[in-house]
Amino acid sequence: MSTTDRELRIGMVGYAFMGAAHSQAWRTVNRVYDLPARASMALICGRDSGQVAQAADRLGWDAYTTDWRDLINRDDIDVVDICTPGDSHAEIALAALAAGKHVLCEKPLANTVAEARAMTAAADTARAAGARSMCGFNYRRVPAVTMMRQMVADGRLGVIRHVRATYLQDWIVDPQFPLVWRLQKERAGSGALGDIGAHIIDLTQFVVGQRITGVSAVTETFVKERPLPAGSSGLAATMDGSADGSGPATGPVTVDDAAIFVARLDGGALATYEASRFATGRKNALRVEINGSLGSVVFDLERLNELEFYDATRPTLEQGFSRILVTEGEHPYMSAWWPPGHIIGYEHSFTHQMRDFIEAIAMGTDPAPSFADALQVQLVLDAVTRSAEVGSTWTEVEPALT
Ligand code: SOE
């Protein structure tokens, strides 16, 4: 346990899936890492007083409120953690930054480029007064992903030629799955593209240190009408099966179910990206392969303690993809956990995220990904959407039979 007496009082808005994941991390981070400040779980906010009271008890928060403005206006809150649907990220973050709070905002940063630009400008202004801000692209903080970045930076892969990223889920394959907020453009901004495509855009730019400069995209909405939700929203409708979609009415799905695009990166690499919620059997399957002139490296979220590494500099007779077990104390983030070979999980990436955020706040440094980094992701999302809408770069294959 840290011996510091500096306290960071956290106020979190939202208590669904990401609220639970962030709460786990706030509860854990100071018990695992010795940090220059100690996070206290002061206040959780949600619209429904009964549900947020239960969440406060279950997730370990000292108090609760149903008004996020109350949370932001309190002098005894230092950090605002935004775990709400994308349509409220900008409003809450702008108010929190104006109040001088440090802000952690879930991904994607916003629902539009305009919102993301405003948030980035406000973060820059708040930074001058000492407030730090970060966007919650948690997969950067899987130790194996940070190690990939180090391998690329150390030149182990040589010149990067290809980036190949997929993020595949299947939780809405059933056409009777209800029209939850993630399927409504005005709430979520986009569908698979912004929800899971944003992760592989950020992760690959982080790993290879290059930025996407252009795309050619297709998107599709396979199921265009869905039953209105009877109760649960978000992924809760899948987790507890309570959303029976029995409501009499249906509504239009206004977001993409899948987005696929090719891209060029500013360091010369060619890339392919696929984000889909209709990859039947794939539950949360994120896979990234980087090919370089001296080797390749592969990350698979379902095997998140490992990397596959192909070292083209090895003797020909010894060539092959080897498995690196990323559990040594010298590996990123791992010194605080268990002896080598004792693996960690999905939730640890959030604890690592809070560790880095607390350290940045306490040391007065800039956490990454910044809002400016997240704006870059938002600009790519926007380019993919525009490309898919105009289809101008799409060249039809001539039919075999004329
Ligand atoms: C739903 O697709 C979701 O919860 C995303 O919103 C998260 O960012 C991802 O990590 C897991 O799946």
Image: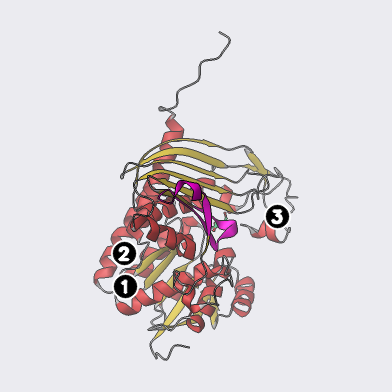
Task: First in sequence, mark 2 or 1: give its number.
Answer: 2
Q: Are marks 2 and 1 in contact (CB under 8 Å)?
A: yes
Q: Residues within 10 Å of mark 3 (few under 14, many from 20)?
A: some
Residue denoted by label 3: 230
Residue denoted by label 2: 123
Check residue 311 for magenta coloring.
Answer: yes
Vertical comparison of 247 with 344: above or below: above
Residue denoted by label 1: 131
Q: State how far apart marks 3 and 1 are (Cα).
A: 41 Å
**On the rendered structure, is 87 left or right of 209?**
right
**On the rendered structure, is 131 left or right of 52?**
left
Vertical comparison of 273 with 395: above or below: below
Vertical comparison of 120 with 42: above or below: above
Q: Residue at x 73, y 49 (%)?
A: 247
> Which residue is at the far top?
402
**On the rendered structure, is 278 left or right of 149?**
right
Residue toward you, 153 or 259: 153
- Ligand 1 is within 8 Å of the C-beta of the residue at disc 2: no
Q: Name the amino acid type tagged 2.
A: Ala
Quadrant where the C terminus lies?
top right
Q: Give the image location of residue 28, x and y in percent.
A: 53, 79
Q: Residue at x 48, y 65 (%)?
A: 143
Q: Give the image location of residue 117, x and y in percent.
A: 32, 54
Q: Give the image location of residue 320, x and y in percent.
A: 52, 49
Q: Residue at x 56, y 68 (%)?
A: 347
Region of the chain picked out in magenta, as a range: 298-323
- Ligand 1 is within 8 Å of the C-beta of the residue at disc 1: no
The kind of secondary structure element at disc 1 is loop
Task: Name the front one of labels 3 and 1.
Answer: 1
